[in-house]
Amino acid sequence: MLDAHPAPDALARPPVPAAVIDPPASPDRPSPGDALFSAAQALLPMLEAGRPLDAATLRDAMREAFGASDAEGAWVWKDAYEVAEAACVLFLQRYGRGMRRTCGADGPRRMLAMLEAVAALEPSHTRRSEEQVRLQQFSTPLPLAYVALQAAAIRPGDTVLEPSAGTGMLAVMGECALGDRATGALHLNEYAQTRARLLTRLFPEAAVTAFNAEAIADRLRDVRPTVV
């Protein structure tokens, strides 16, 4: 990925400051990314209570956050699925380190079992949007994200770059592994503007960019990751 040849328009694209990623359509309406974050916050107590995020629950959270329904065109179900993933990220930011500490000698096996239990509360992704198809977006299940973390062997002191960060499933695993040294050590890139905005809310202490990942090595010349 880092050595991929950049697309012709990628190098010409100027850097996108986090503050202007996915800006609000109007002063009285939140940006889609901010609305997704609000909906994810509303779903967090459901996960904490061990309750499944079913369609009715997702619909209510999305309607409240966007001020309108999917039938009115305010959001699509792909957005609702991403909110469920973002809620899992919030859950792991709150409890992930504690979960790791309680795993004991059989740590990876027990942690994987706990993550599978959390993932089971998420809805199945039964609908795909045109954007998902166009940008080849595929979610990383929580258990698989943990397996990737184990394979990467991230440790405090590493600098982590996620070139296609999505909703932050891999990133939150890296954040948990980095512990107190996560600040400034996470560099998250996501080309989709709404997802990138969501990442700025989920990971306020991370560096978030919205470049085409094909040219990420040219865009982030000052970043020297130890884990990609």
Image: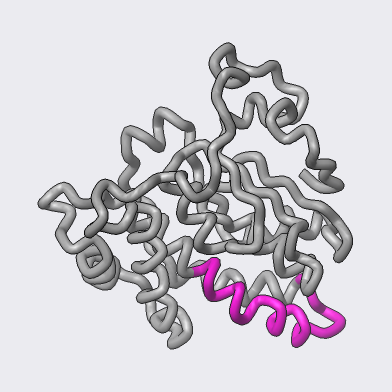
Q: Quadrant of residue 10?
A: top right
Image: 83 above or below 132: below
Magenta span: helix, strand or loop, mainly?
Answer: helix
Q: Position of residue 66 (x, y in %)?
A: 24, 60
Query: Where does the magenta region start and end?
Result: 88-108
- On whether residue 153 falls in the magenta region, the answer is no
Q: Position of residue 123 (x, y in %)?
A: 38, 63
Q: 199 or 30, which lies in front?
A: 30
Total of numbered circles in the picture?
0
Residue drawn at (61%, 43%), measured in percent from left and top? 189
Q: Position of residue 220 (x, y in %)?
A: 72, 35
Task: Indicate left or right for 78 with 147 as reference.
Answer: left
Image: 27 above or below 100: above
Residue drawn at (27%, 72%), measured in percent from left and top? 57
Image: 222 above or below 70: above
Quadrant of the rendering where the N terminus is positioned: top right
Q: Quadrant of residue 153?
A: bottom right
